[in-house]
Image: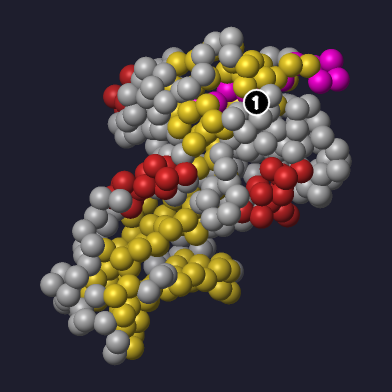
Protein backbone atom coordinates (compact mmCIF):
# COMPACT_ATOMS: atom_id res chain seq x y z
CA UNK A 1 0.00 0.00 0.00
CA UNK A 2 1.35 3.45 -0.92
CA UNK A 3 1.48 6.12 1.73
CA UNK A 4 2.47 9.72 1.60
CA UNK A 5 2.62 12.78 3.73
CA UNK A 6 3.82 16.31 4.16
CA UNK A 7 5.58 17.93 7.06
CA UNK A 8 5.40 21.69 7.41
CA UNK A 9 7.67 23.60 9.75
CA UNK A 10 7.02 27.08 11.07
CA UNK A 11 10.47 28.45 10.41
CA UNK A 12 10.87 32.14 9.86
CA UNK A 13 10.22 33.22 6.27
CA UNK A 14 12.76 31.71 3.90
CA UNK A 15 14.01 33.18 0.65
CA UNK A 16 15.23 31.78 -2.60
CA UNK A 17 17.18 34.33 -4.59
CA UNK A 18 18.16 34.47 -8.23
CA UNK A 19 20.14 37.01 -10.20
CA UNK A 20 16.81 38.31 -11.44
CA UNK A 21 15.50 38.54 -7.89
CA UNK A 22 18.63 40.34 -6.79
CA UNK A 23 18.05 42.82 -9.60
CA UNK A 24 21.78 43.46 -9.73
CA UNK A 25 24.08 43.39 -12.71
CA UNK A 26 27.70 42.33 -12.44
CA UNK A 27 29.23 44.65 -9.89
CA UNK A 28 31.94 46.89 -11.28
CA UNK A 29 32.45 49.05 -8.23
CA UNK A 30 33.27 48.16 -4.65
CA UNK A 31 31.47 49.96 -1.87
CA UNK A 32 32.85 50.06 1.64
CA UNK A 33 35.25 47.19 2.42
CA UNK A 34 33.84 45.05 -0.41
CA UNK A 35 32.77 42.23 1.90
CA UNK A 36 33.44 38.59 1.17
CA UNK A 37 31.04 35.89 2.41
CA UNK A 38 31.34 34.70 6.03
CA UNK A 39 31.64 31.09 4.82
CA UNK A 40 33.60 29.29 2.13
CA UNK A 41 30.78 28.89 -0.40
CA UNK A 42 32.96 27.80 -3.31
CA UNK A 43 32.96 24.34 -4.86
CA UNK A 44 30.16 22.09 -3.67
CA UNK A 45 29.62 23.84 -0.33
CA UNK A 46 25.83 23.87 0.27
CA UNK A 47 25.39 27.58 1.05
CA UNK A 48 21.86 28.98 0.76
CA UNK A 49 20.67 32.54 1.33
CA UNK A 50 17.66 32.68 3.61
CA UNK A 51 16.30 35.85 5.27
CA UNK A 52 17.26 39.37 4.18
CA UNK A 53 17.11 42.69 6.01
CA UNK A 54 13.60 43.97 6.78
CA UNK A 55 13.39 47.29 4.94
CA UNK A 56 10.00 48.21 6.44
CA UNK A 57 10.64 50.32 9.53
CA UNK A 58 7.03 49.92 10.68
CA UNK A 59 5.16 46.83 11.89
CA UNK A 60 5.17 45.19 8.44
CA UNK A 61 7.88 43.30 6.61
CA UNK A 62 9.48 43.85 3.22
CA UNK A 63 12.78 42.67 1.83
CA UNK A 64 15.04 44.87 -0.32
CA UNK A 65 13.34 43.57 -3.50
CA UNK A 66 9.75 44.39 -2.42
CA UNK A 67 9.02 40.80 -1.46
CA UNK A 68 8.49 39.13 1.92
CA UNK A 69 11.80 37.27 2.19
CA UNK A 70 12.36 38.57 5.70
CA UNK A 71 10.51 38.96 8.98
CA UNK A 72 9.62 42.00 11.04
CA UNK A 73 12.67 43.81 12.47
CA UNK A 74 15.17 41.35 10.96
CA UNK A 75 18.49 43.19 10.91
CA UNK A 76 20.71 40.96 8.81
CA UNK A 77 21.36 38.45 6.07
CA UNK A 78 21.13 34.74 6.90
CA UNK A 79 23.33 32.23 5.06
CA UNK A 80 22.44 28.64 5.91
CA UNK A 81 23.34 25.05 5.19
CA UNK A 82 20.64 22.39 4.75
CA UNK A 83 21.15 20.37 7.92
CA UNK A 84 23.27 19.84 11.01
CA UNK A 85 25.57 17.32 9.31
CA UNK A 86 26.39 19.97 6.70
CA UNK A 87 27.05 22.44 9.51
CA UNK A 88 29.62 20.08 10.99
CA UNK A 89 31.38 19.76 7.62
CA UNK A 90 31.12 23.28 6.20
CA UNK A 91 30.68 25.43 9.30
CA UNK A 92 33.92 27.46 9.45
CA UNK A 93 33.09 31.16 9.86
CA UNK A 94 35.37 33.73 8.24
CA UNK A 95 36.02 37.43 8.68
CA UNK A 96 34.35 39.27 5.79
CA UNK A 97 37.11 41.90 5.52
CA UNK A 98 40.13 43.18 7.44
CA UNK A 99 39.28 44.71 10.78
CA UNK A 100 39.58 44.80 14.55
CA UNK A 101 37.46 42.69 16.90
CA UNK A 102 35.44 44.90 19.24
CA UNK A 103 33.47 42.33 21.26
CA UNK A 104 32.76 38.59 21.49
CA UNK A 105 30.43 36.18 23.31
CA UNK A 106 31.09 32.44 23.32
CA UNK A 107 29.46 30.88 26.41
CA UNK A 108 25.90 30.13 25.24
CA UNK A 109 24.76 26.56 24.65
CA UNK A 110 24.00 25.22 21.18
CA UNK A 111 20.28 24.57 21.25
CA UNK A 112 17.65 25.05 18.54
CA UNK A 113 14.83 27.46 19.26
CA UNK A 114 11.88 25.05 19.30
CA UNK A 115 9.51 26.30 22.00
CA UNK A 116 8.13 29.52 23.48
CA UNK A 117 10.24 28.78 26.55
CA UNK A 118 13.34 28.82 24.35
CA UNK A 119 12.27 32.18 22.93
CA UNK A 120 11.95 33.63 26.42
CA UNK A 121 15.33 32.16 27.41
CA UNK A 122 17.04 33.87 24.45
CA UNK A 123 15.46 37.30 25.06
CA UNK A 124 18.14 39.96 24.90
CA UNK A 125 20.67 37.42 23.62
CA UNK A 126 19.06 36.45 20.32
CA UNK A 127 22.43 36.66 18.54
CA UNK A 128 23.77 33.81 20.65
CA UNK A 129 27.52 33.39 20.45
CA UNK A 130 29.07 35.91 18.09
CA UNK A 131 31.45 38.77 17.53
CA UNK A 132 31.56 42.37 16.34
CA UNK A 133 34.30 43.50 13.92
CA UNK A 134 35.14 47.12 13.11
CA UNK A 135 36.33 47.40 9.51
CA UNK A 136 37.31 51.04 9.62
CA UNK A 137 36.26 53.99 7.48
CA UNK A 138 35.55 54.08 3.76
CA UNK A 139 34.55 57.34 2.09
CA UNK A 140 34.09 58.82 5.55
CA UNK A 141 31.72 56.12 6.84
CA UNK A 142 32.55 53.44 9.41
CA UNK A 143 31.51 49.85 8.70
CA UNK A 144 31.06 46.99 11.15
CA UNK A 145 29.89 43.38 10.85
CA UNK A 146 28.18 41.36 13.56
CA UNK A 147 28.25 37.55 13.19
CA UNK A 148 25.70 35.52 15.17
CA UNK A 149 24.70 31.93 16.09
CA UNK A 150 28.21 30.56 16.40
CA UNK A 151 29.12 27.39 18.31
CA UNK A 152 29.88 27.53 22.02
CA UNK A 153 33.58 28.17 22.74
CA UNK A 154 34.43 28.13 19.02
CA UNK A 155 35.40 31.80 18.64
CA UNK A 156 39.15 31.95 18.13
CA UNK A 157 39.71 35.71 18.50
CA UNK A 158 39.34 38.22 21.31
CA UNK A 159 38.43 41.88 21.62
CA UNK A 160 41.34 43.97 20.37
CA UNK A 161 42.64 41.35 17.92
CA UNK A 162 43.24 42.34 14.32
CA UNK A 163 41.76 39.98 11.73
CA UNK A 164 42.35 39.54 8.03
CA UNK A 165 39.85 38.97 5.27
CA UNK A 166 38.84 35.27 5.08
CA UNK A 167 40.55 34.48 8.41
CA UNK A 168 38.73 31.77 10.36
CA UNK A 169 37.18 33.30 13.48
CA UNK A 170 34.95 30.45 14.69
CA UNK A 171 32.38 27.83 13.78
CA UNK A 172 28.70 27.91 12.90
CA UNK A 173 26.51 26.72 15.78
CA UNK A 174 22.96 26.66 17.04
CA UNK A 175 23.18 29.32 19.75
CA UNK A 176 20.66 32.08 20.28
CA UNK A 177 17.34 32.44 18.47
CA UNK A 178 17.93 30.03 15.60
CA UNK A 179 15.72 27.28 14.16
CA UNK A 180 18.13 26.04 11.53
CA UNK A 181 21.93 26.06 11.03
CA UNK A 182 23.02 29.41 9.64
CA UNK A 183 25.24 32.41 10.18
CA UNK A 184 23.45 35.73 10.66
CA UNK A 185 25.37 38.80 9.42
CA UNK A 186 24.40 42.33 10.37
CA UNK A 187 26.30 45.01 8.46
CA UNK A 188 26.19 48.54 9.88
CA UNK A 189 27.24 51.83 8.34
CA UNK A 190 27.94 54.50 10.95
CA UNK A 191 26.00 52.35 13.44
CA UNK A 192 22.90 51.94 11.27
CA UNK A 193 21.87 48.57 9.80
CA UNK A 194 22.30 48.46 6.02
CA UNK A 195 21.42 45.73 3.53
CA UNK A 196 24.75 44.46 2.15
CA UNK A 197 23.21 42.95 -0.99
CA UNK A 198 21.86 46.25 -2.33
CA UNK A 199 23.65 48.81 -0.18
CA UNK A 200 20.27 50.28 0.83
CA UNK A 201 19.21 51.48 4.27
CA UNK A 202 15.92 50.35 5.85
CA UNK A 203 13.18 52.82 5.14
CA UNK A 204 14.40 53.53 1.60
CA UNK A 205 12.65 52.33 -1.54
CA UNK A 206 12.87 48.66 -2.42
CA UNK A 207 13.18 47.12 -5.88
CA UNK A 208 15.84 46.15 -8.42
CA UNK A 209 19.03 48.12 -8.68
CA UNK A 210 21.74 48.13 -11.32
CA UNK A 211 24.02 50.75 -9.86
CA UNK A 212 26.60 48.35 -8.44
CA UNK A 213 25.78 49.58 -4.96
CA UNK A 214 26.20 46.19 -3.29
CA UNK A 215 28.55 46.10 -0.31
CA UNK A 216 29.67 42.60 -1.28
CA UNK A 217 32.74 42.06 -3.41
CA UNK A 218 32.03 41.10 -7.05
CA UNK A 219 33.13 37.54 -6.29
CA UNK A 220 30.84 37.21 -3.27
CA UNK A 221 27.90 38.74 -5.12
CA UNK A 222 28.44 36.38 -8.05
CA UNK A 223 28.30 33.38 -5.70
CA UNK A 224 25.07 34.63 -4.16
CA UNK A 225 23.51 35.13 -7.57
CA UNK A 226 24.53 31.67 -8.81
CA UNK A 227 23.50 29.75 -5.72
CA UNK A 228 20.52 31.61 -4.38
CA UNK A 229 17.87 30.49 -6.85
CA UNK A 230 17.33 27.07 -5.32
CA UNK A 231 13.95 26.09 -3.94
CA UNK A 232 15.13 22.53 -3.37
CA UNK A 233 17.23 22.01 -0.22
CA UNK A 234 17.75 18.29 0.21
CA UNK A 235 16.29 14.81 -0.20
CA UNK A 236 16.97 11.26 0.89
CA UNK A 237 15.64 7.82 1.73
CA UNK A 238 14.42 6.58 5.09
CA UNK A 239 12.97 3.44 6.59
CA UNK A 240 9.89 5.26 7.89
CA UNK A 241 7.93 8.49 7.50
CA UNK A 242 10.00 11.45 8.69
CA UNK A 243 9.28 14.95 9.95
CA UNK A 244 11.10 18.19 9.35
CA UNK A 245 13.02 18.08 12.61
CA UNK A 246 14.32 14.59 11.83
CA UNK A 247 15.49 15.71 8.38
CA UNK A 248 17.27 18.72 9.87
CA UNK A 249 19.02 16.61 12.49
CA UNK A 250 19.61 13.56 10.30
CA UNK A 251 17.76 11.57 12.93
CA UNK A 252 15.95 8.95 10.89
CA UNK A 253 16.31 5.27 10.16
CA UNK A 254 18.15 4.19 7.04
CA UNK A 255 16.05 1.97 4.73
CA UNK A 256 16.63 -1.75 4.26
CA UNK A 257 14.86 -4.69 2.68
CA UNK A 258 13.38 -5.40 6.14
CA UNK A 259 11.70 -2.00 6.54
CA UNK A 260 9.40 0.31 4.54
CA UNK A 261 11.02 2.53 1.91
CA UNK A 262 10.35 6.28 1.96
CA UNK A 263 11.74 9.03 -0.29
CA UNK A 264 11.55 12.58 1.11
CA UNK A 265 12.34 16.01 -0.34
CA UNK A 266 12.57 19.39 1.36
CA UNK A 267 11.90 22.78 -0.25
CA UNK A 268 11.87 26.41 0.82
CA UNK A 269 9.85 29.44 -0.27
CA UNK A 270 7.05 27.65 -2.08
CA UNK A 271 4.18 29.79 -3.32
CA UNK A 272 0.42 29.52 -3.20
CA UNK A 273 -0.71 27.03 -5.83
CA UNK A 274 2.59 25.10 -5.94
CA UNK A 275 2.53 21.33 -5.56
CA UNK A 276 5.06 18.49 -5.64
CA UNK A 277 5.11 15.23 -7.56
CA UNK A 278 7.23 12.50 -5.98
CA UNK A 279 8.11 9.03 -7.20
CA UNK A 280 10.43 6.11 -6.49
CA UNK A 281 11.65 3.75 -9.20
CA UNK A 282 13.34 0.43 -8.49
CA UNK A 283 14.43 -2.83 -10.07
CA UNK A 284 10.86 -3.55 -11.21
CA UNK A 285 10.11 -0.01 -12.43
CA UNK A 286 7.77 2.34 -10.59
CA UNK A 287 7.75 1.54 -6.87
CA UNK A 288 5.63 4.41 -5.48
CA UNK A 289 4.39 7.84 -6.47
CA UNK A 290 2.25 10.64 -5.06
CA UNK A 291 1.26 14.24 -5.59
CA UNK A 292 0.71 16.79 -2.84
CA UNK A 293 -2.28 19.08 -2.80
CA UNK A 294 -1.78 22.56 -4.21
CA UNK A 295 -0.72 24.93 -1.45
CA UNK A 296 -3.45 27.26 -0.25
CA UNK A 297 -0.83 29.77 0.90
CA UNK A 298 2.89 30.32 0.60
CA UNK A 299 5.07 28.01 2.68
CA UNK A 300 8.42 28.99 4.13
CA UNK A 301 9.44 25.35 4.54
CA UNK A 302 7.80 22.26 3.09
CA UNK A 303 8.81 18.62 3.27
CA UNK A 304 6.95 15.85 1.46
CA UNK A 305 7.47 12.11 1.24
CA UNK A 306 6.25 9.06 -0.64
CA UNK A 307 6.79 5.37 -0.02
CA UNK A 308 5.41 1.91 0.65
CA UNK A 309 4.89 0.13 3.91
CA UNK A 310 5.78 -3.18 2.33
CA UNK A 311 9.55 -3.82 2.43
CA UNK A 312 11.28 -3.31 -0.94
CA UNK A 313 13.13 -5.97 -2.88
CA UNK A 314 16.91 -5.84 -3.14
CA UNK A 315 18.16 -3.59 -5.90
CA UNK A 316 18.85 0.01 -6.96
CA UNK A 317 16.30 2.72 -6.19
CA UNK A 318 16.01 6.38 -7.18
CA UNK A 319 13.66 9.14 -6.10
CA UNK A 320 12.46 12.08 -8.16
CA UNK A 321 10.59 15.22 -7.17
CA UNK A 322 9.07 17.83 -9.47
CA UNK A 323 7.98 21.27 -8.31
CA UNK A 324 4.93 22.30 -10.32
CA UNK A 325 4.09 26.01 -10.54
CA UNK A 326 1.39 27.57 -12.69
CA UNK A 327 0.67 24.22 -14.28
CA UNK A 328 4.24 23.64 -15.44
CA UNK A 329 7.24 21.80 -13.99
CA UNK A 330 9.25 24.64 -12.47
CA UNK A 331 12.14 22.47 -11.29
CA UNK A 332 12.98 18.78 -11.12
CA UNK A 333 15.45 16.83 -9.03
CA UNK A 334 16.59 13.20 -9.00
CA UNK A 335 18.16 11.64 -5.95
CA UNK A 336 21.40 9.76 -5.81
CA UNK A 337 21.00 6.06 -6.48
CA UNK A 338 20.27 3.99 -3.37
CA UNK A 339 21.29 0.34 -3.18
CA UNK A 340 19.27 -1.90 -0.90
- Residue 8 image position (x, y, % from top left): 37, 51
Residue extending farthest to the bottom is: 284
Quarter of the rendering occupied by the N terminus? bottom left
Dominant SS of magenta comes to strand
Residue at (66, 55) in percent of width and height: 226
Looking at the rendered structure, the number of numbered marks drawn on it comes to 1
The residue that mark 1 highlights is: 164
Above or below — where is 6 with respect to 221?
A: below
Give residue 193's quadrant in the image: top right
Above or below — where is 159 with respect to 234?
A: above
Above or below — where is 35 with respect to 10?
A: above
For the question of whether residue 295 can be seen, the reply is yes
- Residue 73 image position (x, y, % from top left): 57, 26
Q: 287 left or right of 239?
A: right
For the question of whether residue 206 can be seen, the reply is no
Residue at (47, 44) in percent of width and height: 90
The residue segment tinted magenta is: 138-149
Q: Nearer the viewer, residue 213 or 59?
A: 213
Dot 1 alpha-carbon crowd within 10 angstroms: few under 14, some 14 to 19, many 20 or more: some
Residue at (27, 72) in percent of width and height: 307
Give residue 260's quadrant in the image: bottom left
Amino acid sequence: MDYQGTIRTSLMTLVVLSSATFGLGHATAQNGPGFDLPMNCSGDAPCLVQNLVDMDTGPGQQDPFCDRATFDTHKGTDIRVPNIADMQRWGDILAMADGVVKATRSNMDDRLWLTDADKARFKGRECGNGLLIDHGRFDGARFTTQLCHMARNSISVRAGDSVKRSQKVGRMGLSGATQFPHIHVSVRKDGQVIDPVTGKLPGTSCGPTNDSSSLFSPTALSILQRRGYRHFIEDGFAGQAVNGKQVLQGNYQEPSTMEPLVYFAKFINLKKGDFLRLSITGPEGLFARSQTKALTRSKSSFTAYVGKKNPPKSGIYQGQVDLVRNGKVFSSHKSKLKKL
